Image (spheres, rainbow, N blue to C red):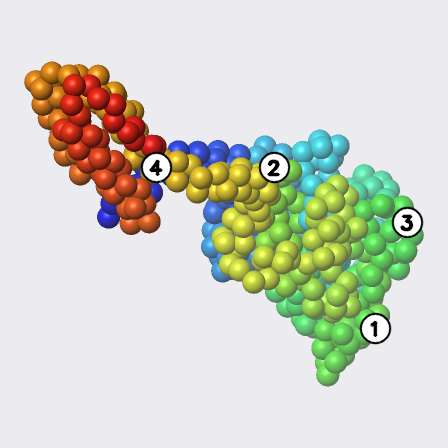
Amino acid sequence: MSGWRDFLKVYWPLIAVAAVGLGAALLLMDPAPPKHIRFAAGSPGGAYHAYAERYQRLLAEQGVEVDLVDTAGSIENLRLLDEGEVDAALVQGGLASRQDREELHSLGGLFPEPFWVFVHASNGINSFGDLRGYRFAIGAEGSGTRSLALALQGEFGGTWPASAQLPLSGTEAADALRAGTVDAVAFAASVDASYVQQLLRDPGVSLLPFERAPALARRQAALSYVTLLRGVVDIGADIPSSDVPLVAPVAQLAVNKDLHPAIEALLIDSAIAIHGNGSLISEPGTWPDPDATDLPVPNSVRRHYQNGPSFLRRYFSFDVANFLDRAWVLAIPMLTLLVPLVRAAPPIYRWRVRRKIYVWYKDIRELEARGRASPAPEERTQILKELEDLQHEIGTVEVPLSYTDDLYRLRSHVEFVKQLVMNSRNGAAATAVSV
């Protein structure tokens, strides 16, 4: 126990310096990633919402809670991101404003979401421009579908009546088409959206082709030209019964530029897991794509696509890997500080222990000098008493076993001086103790 006390007495300054350095390092480290984020998910029942639920499940497996925020669609998603009300959102490509490009960045394009226009099979509608005279549901206010539909209405020219701009969307719009309360509906959605699949298989509903899709894609930078191949939805039922040309914006994962990089990495890994297997209109491995976006993509995001998860993320849990990833940059300054301290500790320790022994020699020399210079017996008796008191005090000194020989040497020197004083006569010279 005394060894530990001596160790702490000697090493406590080094321990204190190391503790202060560690505390400062922890304070200076990059902040830990949040355990809770908000995700703008679109309208319930929509494709965006279904994808957002998958992101929620995957991030929950890594200990990050995701709150889904129901919205009207991409326009509202961008607004919430700009205002800092949400941290991430799925948004339709081509809708970002200059402010969006300043405040937000993208983690990549996720999938093409064709612009589907379904009509009653019996109406004989052959072109998007024919819909001007029909009850046409083009999506809710603030949705990407509505924004794209209005842009296409402008491309086809003329003034479109309010009846051709009804605000129904998603499952509600699909139900209205089947019920006959609207004549046509539009969706900018994934081919996997439940209401798209239902309408593709409904014999009373027809998918309107965009025969001039390449021209529209050339005129609208946010659009690409895709083809829904014959039979790709259902080979046996031959759905669709012919190739269908379509236009498609690309859905992208947009985040606030202040979102923690570790959360961005989790979102990218989730995007690869969710969208990397391809779909009925894209090959596996095509998505996600960091180049298919109209928002800026940071270099760190591009490196993640190129190199994959970090070495630490491959072998440790998210929390441990993130802590080590933030802490390793502090290892060099910490080692630079600790190495000289550790090297200095043994000599300091030896000096402190031996000082406990050698500090007594000053008193011994003083008593020896007084004893040699004091002819009176009374004075020598007083000196002998002080030497005995000194012996008693030295007897309480505790040192590690490896330094016991120094302690006993000190005690023998005290005894030698006692004998020297006791045997001195008339101030005769005595042999001085050699220290």
Name the residue carrying label 1.
Answer: 242
Name the residue carrying label 3.
Answer: 218
- Specify few, some or many for label 4: CA neighbours under 10 Å numbering under 14, 14-19, or 20 or more: some
**Alpha carbons under labels 1 and 2: distance apart:** 47 Å
Where is 11 relative to 222, above or below?
above
| Residue 161 appears anywhere in the view | no
Nearer the observer, 324 or 110: 324
Name the residue carrying label 2.
Answer: 258
Among numbered discs 4 and 2, the one appearing first in the sequence: 2
Name the residue carrying label 4.
Answer: 354
**Mark 3, secondary structure of its residue:** helix
Nearer the observer, 309 or 142: 309
For image coordinates 14% across by 29% down, the residue present is 422
Where is 89 relative to 9, above or below?
below
Q: Nearer the viewer, mark 3 or mark 2?
A: 2
Among numbered discs 1 and 2, the one appearing first in the sequence: 1
